[in-house]
Image (cartoon, grey):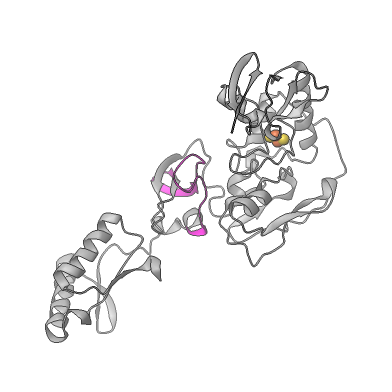
């Protein structure tokens, strides 16, 4: 792909000609505000926050959806652009409630940040109130239609990143909303709420458990399977209150499955086994580690002696580390003497 040279805010930059103005600006270290744009999706072009002026063109154009051209001169900041972006936000706020104090997204909401940045202190435009049903919801994901700004990120992510297409937009104008068009296909993976730039899609498990600025985010590897997805455990008072992801971290680049995103409550569960249990008289009873290990070793030795090592089979777990799984198969093959060893990820 050949290169082109353009100027952005007076900075000359050479980039591949398949880049957008937004991508070129990022390379040049120039920030252009965005709302609907997401790096993992094709440009949506619904919010108009990224408008820029291109010399020779009378109308500002969306930087996220306009390819660079050789020799163009782009301005990303001017009085006119500020007013256009401010007006776009004001129009978004026509139906968006200013309920930030009770919104889960408070403190990490792109809309909240932009409203602050553009100094909007009141809702200037008004429209008749729409009675909208909260149609799209699962036991884990909640949709707040009044907070939805129709950026289409959730719908696009479900279609382009997850290749599912379980949700779509229905209705016209201010009456439109996200609906579940294929509820049977929804995997509750949470991709939609992960990309939502406002509090229109929130999760049910972590609600009211803690604001982002008082919890600590600990980057770790998901324990559910061998993919090694990276996630952040949101920790408050030594308890996990939620899971978030970062677009720049790990092979998953922010995506998770339902287990990784929502399956964290077991960590602090009172029902977790912390001591070995031995079945005695038909009932599990707590035992010490020495007693439990002696019992297992004795039983394995007895079976091996009486029926041979192939009478034993072992199943390992994706919830263990690679090192633990390696040791386990080594023990079964080298100590027990059988290749009857498998892993739950293949079930
Ligand atoms: Fe470009 Fe929304 S970020 S139109």
The residues colored magenta run: 234-259
Q: Is residue 238 magenta?
A: yes
Choose between 166 and 125: the one closer to the eye.
166
Q: Quadrant of the N terminus?
A: top right
> Is residue 271 among what the camera can see?
yes
> Is residue 288 among what the camera can see?
no
How many marks do you count on the picture? 0
Q: Quadrant of the C terminus?
A: bottom left
Task: Name the side, left or right, on which 47 lies relative to 317.
Answer: right
Q: Is residue 106 magenta?
A: no
Image height of 128 relative to 65, above or below? below
**Residue at point 18% right, 66% down?**
331
Image height of 2 relative to 292, above or below? above
Instruction: Residue at the far bottom: name it.
Output: 306
What is the quadrant of residue 153 in the picture? top right
**Residue at point 77% right, 56% down?**
133
Task: Name the side, left or right, on which 303 lies relative to 177.
Answer: left
State the image coordinates of residue 256 (x, y, percent, origin top left): 50, 53
Instruction: Please tell me in which quarter of the rendered image ligand 1 is found.
Output: top right
Image height of 39 relative to 188, above or below? above
State the image coordinates of residue 142 (x, y, percent, origin top left): 64, 54
């Amino acid at each position: 792909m050949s290169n082109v040279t353009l100027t952005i805010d007076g900075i000359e930059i050479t980039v591949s000609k398949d880049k957008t103005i937004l991508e070129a600006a990022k390379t040049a270290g120039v920030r252009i505000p965005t709302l609907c744009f997401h790096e993992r999706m094709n440009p949506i072009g619904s919010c108009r926050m990224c408008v820029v002026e291109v010399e020779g063109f009378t109308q500002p154009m969306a930087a996220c959806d306009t390819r660079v051209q050789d020799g163009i001169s782009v301005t990303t900041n001017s009085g006119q652009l500020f007013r256009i972006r401010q007006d776009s936000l004001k129009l978004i706020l026509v139906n968006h409630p200013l309920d930030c104090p009770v919104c889960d997204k408070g403190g990490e909401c792109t809309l909240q940040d932009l409203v602050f940045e553009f100094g909007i202190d009141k809702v200037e435009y008004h429209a008749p109130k729409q009675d909208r049903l909260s149609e799209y919801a699962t036991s884990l994901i909640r949709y707040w239609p009044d907070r939805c700004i129709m950026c289409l990120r959730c719908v696009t992510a479900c279609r382009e990143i997850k290749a599912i297409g379980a949700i779509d937009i229905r209705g016209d104008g201010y009456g439109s909303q996200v609906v579940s068009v294929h509820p049977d296909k929804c995997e509750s993976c949470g991709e939609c709420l992960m990309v939502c730039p406002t509090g229109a899609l929130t999760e049910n498990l972590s609600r009211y458990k803690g604001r982002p600025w008082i919890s600590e985010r600990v980057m770790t590897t998901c324990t559910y399977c061998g993919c090694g997805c990276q996630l952040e455990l949101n920790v408050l008072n030594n308890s996990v209150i939620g899971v978030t992801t970062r677009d720049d971290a790990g092979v998953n680049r922010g995506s998770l499955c339902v287990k990784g995103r929502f399956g964290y409550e077991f960590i602090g569960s009172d029902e977790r086994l912390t001591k070995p249990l031995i079945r005695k008289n038909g009932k599990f009873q707590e035992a010490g580690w020495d007693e439990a290990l002696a019992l297992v070793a004795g039983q394995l030795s007895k079976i091996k002696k009486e029926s041979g090592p192939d009478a034993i089979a072992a199943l390992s777990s994706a919830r263990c580390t690679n090192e633990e799984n390696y040791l386990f198969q080594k023990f079964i093959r080298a100590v027990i003497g059988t290749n009857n060893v498998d892993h739950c990820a293949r079930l």
